Image (cartoon, rainbow, N blue to C red):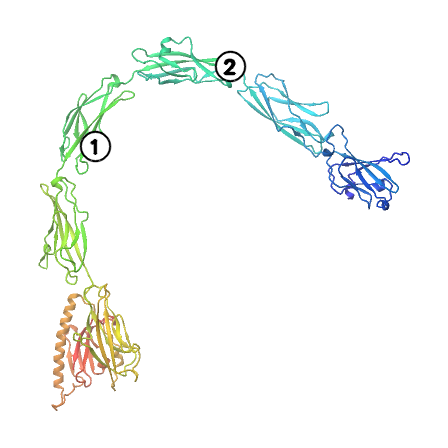
Amino acid sequence: MKSCKRYVLLVVLFHLVHTNSASVTHYSIPEEMKEGSVVANLATDLSLDVESLNQRKMRLDIIANKKYLDVNKETGELYIVEKIDREYICTTKSSASCFLKLEMILENPVRIFNIEVEILDMNDNAPQFRRDTIHLDISEATARGERFSLSNAVDPDVGRNSVKTYHLSASEYFNIEVQTGRDGSKFSELILTKALDREKQALHNLILTAVDGGTPARSGTASVIVRVLDTNDNSPTFDQSIYNVKITENYPIGSRVIHLNATDLDEGTNSDISYSYSLYTSEKTQQTFNLNSATGEITVKGTLNYEDFRIYDMEVIATDKGANSLSGQCTIKILVEDMNDNHPEISIKSFQSPVNENIELDTVIAVVSVSDKDSGDNGVVDLHIPDNMPFKLRESSDNYYELVVSEPLDREKVPEYDITFTVTDRGSPPLSDNETMTLELLDVNDNVPQFPQSFYTIRVMENNAPGALLSSLTAFDPDLHENQYLVYFILEKEIANTSMSMLFSINPENGNLYALKTFDYELEKEFLFHIEARDSGSPPLSSNVTVHIIIVDQNDNAPVIVSPWRAHGSVVEEKIPRSTDKGSLVAKVIALDTDSVHNSRITYQFLQVTDATLFNLDQYNGEIRTMRMFSYRDPRHQRLVVVAKDNGEPALSATVTIKLSTVETAVKAFSDMTEVPLEYDIFSDLNLYLVIGLGSVSFLLLITILVTIVLKCQKPKPSKAAPPCRNSVISERNSTIADSTLVSNDAYWYSLFLAETRKGKLVVRQPVPKGSRYIVSSIPRGTGQTEASDSAASTLQV
């Protein structure tokens, strides 16, 4: 509050008046003081007791104004209640001074003090034009020095804070002069300093700036737009002073010859132009050509004939429509040229069609003549045919041409040719004529029948029905008529004394191939032969194709169990020691399937089993092994039903029933021999039959040897049969399996016999119980355990 006192100009005037008369106290403050700012201490200035102000009910009245000031009754200070705007309080500029009149009233005793507060002006307003844009229209004929009044700017501030001067943006055509009015206000006048030319610059954009005298100075701007008004001071001008035009005879009536264009730099009616012929243009020219007075377009009005009139001269005047019209002129020279108005002609003197497609080269097909009634270059003609044809033109004499064969013809590629003869003269523009002739080609048997493929592979499912359609083998011959009629037949070929025509047949007309019999994959797997297609031309042409028939296997053969061997429908009985260890081989099931590899893949599984916790069956090799040792609670007889199932769709299967009996024995089988794997090879069909035959012979031989050994080893007592001697030879294998291993699926077997593998001998190690039967298998050396199912098996009966 103390800081505010620094800006308050206090002028106190005391006047001595009569008793009870009040003195006038005068203060001066700037406008826009902040609310709460202290103007003066009235108690001090008026010599009043501060403590009595409340008791005397001091109040402050503002005459004819709202309450901008008030007195603090505690301190006697006069302070700002509301910010004061001098321009709002004193709206008139008739006086430079602006006062707020106040009355401070005290009671007990009543006293009235008159107070004047002068509001001093601050430069808080910028000059402002009544219009932001000032438009002026000035004729381009206005003389230099002409003055034009401009709108003045208004500044609410007074004194030196009001408008002091004006400035104009740089211009070579205009300047301003600042004038002072009777009331002291400033205004400006626009002065033309240079003659205007609308054609050079039609619009002038100026900026007028008003500046006041405050510190810092404030300014306002207005845009001054001067539009230059046109006067008819420019004459029309043509693009060219002389025009040379060439047109041909027979030019169509109404066609445009030339479009004249004259321009006038003026605007409005001063630039509107009309065209007309001058007095120097002949009547003949005006009758032949029409001039459009509004557009300046010259068109053909009469018939043009090169032989009658070749050159036309004319003069055209362009006149504007100004008050004082101005004009310009040009000269036009029209040259009529000769026109190529006669078309050349073509005459076909000779034409040969149809012709054979094997016609010799350089043979003449047609003779043609050409002509043109015009003269000069317009009468010179050229004859040609399309470039992409196997023919050429050869000039035989003046304007006579021969059409000859230049390349070999092929009816299958192009059956006929549309030959267009085109004759063109050398006129400008050139004229032409054409004639089209059709040349037809006759067919010659020059194409061999073609199959889409050179090799056909046909898959046939076995057990097919006789007469079934296997495939359709169709060839194509691009020739025509009898040259394209094809006959199909099978080229004879014998396989195993069987002719292909006994197995297959083909429809000679459409190439449909049929099977004459039912095929069995196990007997016949594929056939390879040739089929020939022959046309009916003269001489006939033919081609052949190779056909490969593949018989596809069906799952039509069920697995056959070859081990353990048993009579059809009988149960296999086996005996094993009750003391057999866990994991011992009890039996091995071997099944064979004559189908293809996929269908013959066999898996094994239990169909029935007395005790599922006692035995385990390998699903891939068919080995049955103990899962634990026998206990006293286990029954002495175990019944196992094993099913062998192939991988076909649907699957086929075979079953075998094995009845196992456990026996008590003090003899322990060699543990190392119980784990000998039973392996077999995968035989081909032919080898399988050989192995079965060899196994049968070996089996009979083995039985004979065993019977002989038993008879020789019997004791002298006739009533008791002597057991075979220990280490006696029971059998000796054929030399073909001498390098093999003899194994059995019975663990007890190893305690009775010793197999000499290299010699193929079986030696008795201890007495063999009568009535025993064992399965003995021969496994070639070098095979693994998983292949044991392919071994040759025999049954040993004691």
Can residue 655 be seen by looking at this rendering?
A: yes
Q: Which residue is mark 1?
A: 389
Whole-percent x, y for residue 644 in the image: 23, 70
Q: Nearer the viewer, residue 179 or 606?
A: 606
Residue at the outermost right position? 19
Q: On the rendered structure, is 500 left or right of 77?
A: left
Left/right placement of residue 604 relative to residue 735 reads right
478 and 23: which is toward the camera: 23
Image quadrant holding the C terminus, namely bottom left
Which residue type carries mark 2? Answer: Gly
Specify whether 422 is left or right of 523.
right
For the residues marked 1 and 2, what is the alpha-carbon distance in whole angstroms? 71 Å
Q: Is residue 716 above or below residue 156?
A: below
State which quarter of the image contains the N terminus.
top right
Which quarter of the picture shows residue 599? bottom left
Residue identified by numbered label 2: 322
Residue shown at 30%/10% (left/top)?
308
Image quadrant where residue 52 sits: top right
Instruction: Give, as a three-letter code, the residue at label 1.
Output: Met
User: Element under label 2?
Assistant: loop
- Asked if marks 1 and 2 touch (Cβ < 8 Å), the reply is no
Q: Is residue 175 left or right of residue 90?
A: left
SS assignment at label 1: loop
